[in-house]
Amino acid sequence: MRDINTAKANIEASGFLDIDIDVNLDLFSEIEKLKKEKNAIVLAHYYQEPDIQDVADFIGDSLGLAQQAEKTKADIIVFAGVHFMAETAKILNPTKKVLLPDLKAGCSLSDSAPPELFKLFKDKHPDHMVITYINCSAGMKALSDIICTSSNAEKIIESLPREQKIIFAPDKNLGAYLNKKTGRNMVLWNGACMVHEIFSFEKISKLKIRHPKAKVIAHPECEDVVLRIADYVGSTTGLLKYSIENQADEFIVVTETGILHQMQKSSPGKTFIPAPPNNSCACNDCPHMKLNTLEKLYVCMEYETPEITMNESLIIAAKKPIERMLAISKQYGL
Ligand code: 13P
Ligand code: SF4
């Protein structure tokens, strides 16, 4: 039996509070109790495991989650997502406690843009503004003029004059997609998401032959070759909405598999086929998102750890471009 003090001392190494809990506990009702007792809200991304989605107060894409974090009256924000998302919630709520069930829930896309290297890149383009995808560290946000997500990126870009030179970071696939959509020529940082890069064009094409009536719906973090065969490209919220509103009975879903839970719940009569990766592993599951479990969520709420902590000057610097994004989104009714 691991004792609580040893587990707390080990959080930095393990990423979470590694203690044994009673296997007979009904975690769903325990979490509900803790929410009320502590005035806590559970925010979950669509890529979280189904149990976590079912216990969350709000499930959304990155923009929806940031908007909820900005307006919540809760004292504690429990973020069932990855580190940059919880960090964004903390930046918007510096005085609140923000918990992340597993601190090691990172993001390969965020890791592909170390702020020190990006600063050198930015300095080489002094006349460019920096639009940065929210999937990045607070250090990257502090170097940015405006943050965007996949659901507002087009509008954020269009809010700038056409002649304005722009650097887009860190996702080269989303950046290339946006260059095509907006007719701009943004300078792209060479980053990518390990999950969205792994989808196989060949296997999706074969699936399409076997399911000729299926709509292919894809996240814009995918490579161009995959996006070109998609019937619809959008953020996770956009994909879910399309799957509800479109008349088709079958959908080939080219993004992380967690989103299928809400798709199936919203349209029980429809069939959702997860797009296959280019190898035999389950690489269309995000290994970072899936580090969170219902058990870890319960433990982090009960003991109020691990918590996101940040220094004040970083919070101030990173907040400005996030607030700019939220203001532009409001302006466009997003
Ligand atoms: P959205 O939910 O904003 O579409 O982002 C997907 C993603 O990769 C989050 O990590
Ligand atoms: Fe990062 Fe990709 Fe996982 Fe999203 S799916 S958290 S972008 S690694």
Image (cartoon, rainbow, N blue to C red):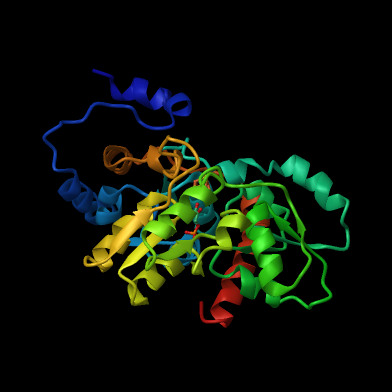
Left or right of residue 226: residue 132: right
Choose between 276 and 69: the one closer to the eye: 276
- Residue, x 82% and y 67% (percent of image)? 165
- Residue 128 image offset from top left, x and y in percent: 83, 62
Extreme residue in the front direction: 209
Choose between 181 and 20: the one closer to the eye: 181
Give the answer, above or below, for where 37 lies relative to 309. Answer: below
- Residue 271 image offset from top left, x and y in percent: 28, 61
Q: Is residue 320 visible?
A: no
Total marks shown come to 0
Extreme residue in the top direction: 1
- Residue 137 image offset from top left, x and y in percent: 61, 47
Choose between 193 and 99: the one closer to the eye: 193
The quadrant the N terminus occupies is top left
Left or right of residue 158: residue 110: left
Examine the image and state in which quarter residue 75 appears. Answer: bottom left
- Residue, x 34% and y 62% (percent of image)? 58
Examine the image and state in which quarter residue 194 appears. Answer: top right
- Residue 21 image offset from top left, x and y in percent: 21, 30
Q: Is residue 159 visible?
A: yes
Give the answer, above or below, for where 78 lies relative to 2. Answer: below
